[in-house]
């Protein structure tokens, strides 16, 4: 009769194995993918915040279309290192980490339906003073400023050349001559001081604290009569007053000059950005749903998925209860007494846990190192997969690394769970052994 009962345990052991695998897998997914700390830890492990400044931003600057910046007073083509350094000083890695972890703190609970909605406000206003200081510390020093000085002098010379007044027939002032005159009058130290003040003017404007800025380089105070007379040439002293009027009150640039150079759409975009800087940019579940889809059915499917994720997470304890009920049933069917009824299930749990542990370890060891986004077929989700170079390449490389590490963390969580079950069942087997030993000695003593 006992052998018949033990034969019935074979299918129960198989069912127990399947249920336990499901419980371990789902619990590990819940411990990782449904946990905001999992994403935060992955970013830290991948050193993504430093990688942005070390690789992604430099690659993005190298790919920048220089035609889009050709109208700027200075050339930024050779300033990529300085731009990256200024951005990193204004928005350090710890600040990026803080923003990311704030996002996961509100987004993950919403995605797993722990929260009905979320609101996140991205603010950079508190960093605006740091931006101004970073520009000063990076661009207004050393050889970097020497290059900027040349570009700005050329720009100012071009401005005055384009606004030359009517000259005597025998006077021909060229742009290089104006540049030479400015170089002899405007020292680097003086221009640096003007730029320092200009930065302090523009930052509050961009922050939305005021609606204007007024940059004025008092060039008229630096250009002497002798310099103007050299430009006019011998015998043209009578035109000195006209030259003074040409210099005027110096070089001035205000928000109105900026608006005149922009299209109506660009002006509106600028005002929007200033508003976001001043008040913060708020993003909530409604904005997210609009970004996902405008199809009501797809949004309903999204909400259904969130609901069932929440239901599944709330019933994880059932996933563990059911297989262990099977395990108890196996013990009663296959055991003769209390010791064998306890030892049998513990041995089965130990063996099953060991098999799962080794299977996960060997599978990951065999194929884990080859697992990349290409293998995952990311193109199925974001469009046809294409190889990239430049910023696309460095982004893909880091994305592959993060994906690989994330799956590795999931696998590691499964291995740890199996290991804990092995330790617990092994301790239980040892306890049953001690129980059996004590019981045997007691029986011998009684005999």
Image (cartoon, helix red, strand yellow):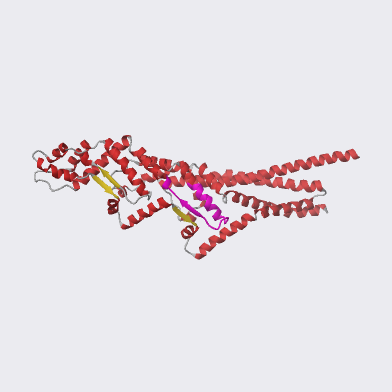
Examine the structure image and report whether residue 110 is included in the region drawn in magenta.
yes
Image quarter of residue 412:
top right
What segment carries the magenta color? 99-126
The answer to whether residue 371 is seen in the rendering is: no
- Residue 124 is situated, as x and y percent measured from the top left of the image, at 42, 47
| Quadrant the N terminus occupies | bottom right
Q: Residue at x 38, y 52 (%)?
A: 274
Q: Residue furthest bottom?
A: 296
Q: Is residue 257 left or right of residue 16?
A: left
Q: Residue at x 77, y 50 (%)?
A: 331
Q: Residue furthest front?
A: 210
- Residue nearest the observer in this picture, 57 or 285: 285
The total of numbered circles placed on residues is: 0
Q: Residue at x 85, y 40 (%)?
A: 440
Examine the structure image and report whether residue 283 is included in the region drawn in magenta.
no
Q: Is residue 432 left or right of residue 154?
A: right
| Quadrant the C terminus occupies | top right
Q: Residue at x 13, y 48 (%)?
A: 166
- Residue nearest the observer in this picture, 428 or 3: 428
The answer to whether residue 244 is seen in the rendering is: yes
Q: Residue furthest top?
A: 142
- Residue 318 is situated, as x and y percent measured from the top left of the image, at 68, 55
- Residue 197 is situated, as x and y percent measured from the top left of the image, at 31, 41
């Amino acid at each position: 009769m006992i052998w018949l009962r033990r034969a019935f345990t074979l299918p129960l052991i198989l069912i127990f194995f399947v249920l336990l695998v499901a419980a371990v897998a789902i619990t590990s997914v819940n411990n990782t993918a449904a946990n905001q700390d999992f994403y935060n830890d992955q970013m830290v492990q991948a050193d993504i915040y430093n990688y942005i400044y070390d690789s992604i931003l430099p690659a993005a600057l190298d790919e920048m279309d220089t035609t889009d910046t050709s109208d700027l007073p200075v050339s930024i083509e050779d300033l990529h290192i300085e731009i990256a350094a200024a951005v990193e000083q204004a928005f350090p890695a710890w600040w990026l980490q803080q923003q990311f972890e704030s996002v996961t703190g509100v987004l993950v609970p919403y995605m797993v339906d722990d929260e009905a909605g979320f609101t996140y406000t991205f603010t950079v206003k508190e960093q605006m003073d740091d931006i101004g200081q970073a520009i000063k510390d990076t661009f207004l020093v050393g050889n970097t400023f020497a290059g900027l000085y040349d570009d700005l002098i050329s720009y100012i010379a071009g401005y005055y050349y384009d606004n030359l007044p009517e000259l005597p027939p025998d006077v021909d002032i060229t742009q290089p001559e104006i540049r030479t005159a400015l170089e002899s009058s405007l020292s680097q130290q003086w221009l640096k001081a003007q730029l320092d003040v200009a930065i302090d003017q523009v930052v509050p404007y961009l922050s939305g604290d005021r609606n204007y800025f007024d940059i004025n380089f008092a060039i008229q105070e630096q250009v002497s009569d002798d310099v103007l007379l050299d430009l006019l040439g011998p015998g043209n002293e009578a035109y000195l007053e006209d030259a003074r009027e040409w210099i005027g009150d110096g070089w001035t640039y205000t928000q109105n000059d900026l608006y005149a150079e922009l299209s109506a759409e660009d002006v509106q975009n600028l005002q929007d950005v200033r508003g976001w800087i001043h008040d913060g940019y708020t993003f909530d579940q409604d904005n997210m749903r609009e970004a996902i889809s405008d199809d009501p059915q797809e949004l309903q499917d999204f909400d259904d998925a969130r609901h069932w994720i929440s239901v599944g997470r709330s019933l994880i304890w059932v996933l563990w209860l059911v297989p262990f009920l099977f395990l108890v049933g196996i013990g009663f069917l296959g055991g003769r007494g209390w010791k064998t009824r306890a030892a049998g299930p513990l041995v089965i749990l130990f063996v099953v846990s060991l098999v799962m542990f080794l299977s996960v370890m060997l599978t990951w060891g065999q194929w884990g190192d080859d697992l990349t986004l290409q293998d995952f077929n990311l193109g199925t989700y974001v469009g046809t997969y294409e190889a990239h170079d430049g910023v696309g390449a460095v982004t893909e490389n880091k994305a592959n690394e993060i994906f690989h590490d994330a799956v590795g963390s999931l696998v590691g969580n499964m291995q740890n769970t199996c290991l804990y079950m092995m330790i617990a069942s092994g301790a239980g087997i040892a306890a049953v052994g001690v129980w059996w030993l004590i019981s045997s000695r007691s029986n011998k003593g009684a005999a």
